[in-house]
């Protein structure tokens, strides 16, 4: 990079879990001159070199708004994602898929040289649960019954075409595991547990049992570590997809040790039926379709991120999960609408 040129970076979804960590990381980077954070609702968050602008990607006219905001940008990091409502996948499709396509088109029209897109382990087709895991060449067809996976996988196909048609644009796809930090706990509790689940109930001493389910092996990562990978992608010259996860795989035994709880074998059909009943009754927002997907997600090999990006996670999987549990009990959050902290709301 030219030593006299400092990067101008635009981040969509900048007020969410990854966004709040990333804008902080970028604001500290001497190679970054300015950051423009885009969100549906403006935050009460002041950081050096960071400005904010309102943008609702689900609106058909958002591409015109983006055209002005992206002019002169050196990189766009697309993080914006809507998890709810799980009972109305048309709403999430319009925001997540159609909104992402508007971002991609605006990047092309504005001549932005780099696009970093937040994909997910959820984009992967079912695969092996054992190490060393799958690399970035594993099929990305998702689990079609889960809206989240279906949307992430569809955007992988969109980016395949985008890269073919725009070879001059450097495209990076991040495929992280489950992302946790202390200040994401309140948001994630609301997304997956609902507003009726008090954070104070998510305490190790109140969770005496951990169900041991077939397929319950997954990877997590501290959000700040994910943000560091995004920062490296923005300021470097890497292309292509990258798996991101902490060094160890989390299973029922690891959860039992973390929570000091007894691990008990449980039949998947019984647990799924209970979740499906609660979801259909709208008692919880997490769908049984996403539960199905989690049990089928492959374990990822993150060698490429280490070798190409020079990325190393600072936090272990247990440290990321411990941070989340601490945040849930404390009602931790951020001064942004999606990340507002509260034990109850």
Image: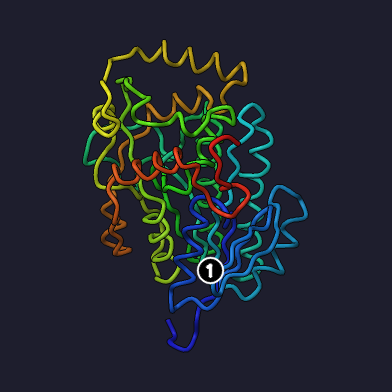
Residue at 60%, 53% (x, y): give it: 336
Q: Residue at x 47, y 49 (%)?
A: 183
Task: Place residue 109 in its image quadrant.
Answer: bottom right
Residue at image point 50% right, 50% down: 17
Q: In the displayed structure, would residue 254 be above or below residue 235? A: above
Q: Is residue 119 above or below residue 286?
A: below
Q: How is the image coloured?
A: rainbow
Q: Position of residue 154 (x, y in %)?
A: 54, 41
Q: Residues within 10 Å of mark 1 (few under 14, many from 20)?
A: many
Q: Residue furthest bottom?
A: 4
**Quarter holding the N terminus?**
bottom left
- Tag 1, which secondary structure? strand
Image height check: is 45 above or below 237? above
Horizontal and vertical percent position of residue 311: 30, 61
Q: Report the residue marked by disc 1.
A: 75
Q: Position of residue 304 (x, y in %)?
A: 29, 56
Depth check, front residue: 229 or 158: 229
Quarter of the image where one finds residue 69: bottom right
**Camera-side residue of 168 and 307:** 307
In the displayed structure, does residue 277 sit left or right of residue 127?
A: right
Residue at the image position 28 percent from the left and 58 percent from the top: 312
Residue 2 or residue 239, whichever sits in front: 2
Residue 215 vertical position relative to residue 276 in the rendered view, above or below? below
Q: Quadrant of the C terminus?
A: top right
Q: Give the x, y percent position of residue 28.
A: 44, 72
Name the residue at the right extreme.
61
State how many labels appear.
1
């Amino acid at each position: 990079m030219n030593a006299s040129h400092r990067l101008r970076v635009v981040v969509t979804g900048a007020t969410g879990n990854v966004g709040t960590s990333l804008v902080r990381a970028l604001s500290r980077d001497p190679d970054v001159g300015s950051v423009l954070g885009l969100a549906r609702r403006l935050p009460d968050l002041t950081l050096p070199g960071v400005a904010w602008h309102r943008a609702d990607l689900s609106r058909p006219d958002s591409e015109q708004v983006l055209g002005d905001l992206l002019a002169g940008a050196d990189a766009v990091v697309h993080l914006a994602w809507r998890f709810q409502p799980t009972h109305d996948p048309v709403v999430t499709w319009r925001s997540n898929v159609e909104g992402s396509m508007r971002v991609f088109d605006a990047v092309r029209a504005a001549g932005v040289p780099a696009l970093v897109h937040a994909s997910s382990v959820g984009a992967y087709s079912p695969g092996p649960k054992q190490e060393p895991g799958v690399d970035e060449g594993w099929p990305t067809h998702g689990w079609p019954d889960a809206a989240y996976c279906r949307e992430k996988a569809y955007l992988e196909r969109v980016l395949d075409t985008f890269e073919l048609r725009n070879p001059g644009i450097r495209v990076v796809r991040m495929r992280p595991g489950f992302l946790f930090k202390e200040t994401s706990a309140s948001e994630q509790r609301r997304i997956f547990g609902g507003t009726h689940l008090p954070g104070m109930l998510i305490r190790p001493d109140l969770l005496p049992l951990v169900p041991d389910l077939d397929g319950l092996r997954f990877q997590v990562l501290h959000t700040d570590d994910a943000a560091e990978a995004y920062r490296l992608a923005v300021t470097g010259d890497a292309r292509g997809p990258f798996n991101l996860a902490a060094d160890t795989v989390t299973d029922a035994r690891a959860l039992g040790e973390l929570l000091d709880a007894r691990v008990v074998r449980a039949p998947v059909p019984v647990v799924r039926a209970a979740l499906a009943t609660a979801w259909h009754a709208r008692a919880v927002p997490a769908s049984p379709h996403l539960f199905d997907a989690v049990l089928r997600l492959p374990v990822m090999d993150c060698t490429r991120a280490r070798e190409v990006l020079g990325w190393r996670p600072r936090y272990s999987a247990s440290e990321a999960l411990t941070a989340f549990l601490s945040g849930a009990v404390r009602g931790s959050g951020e001064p942004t609408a999606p990340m507002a902290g509260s034990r109850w709301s």
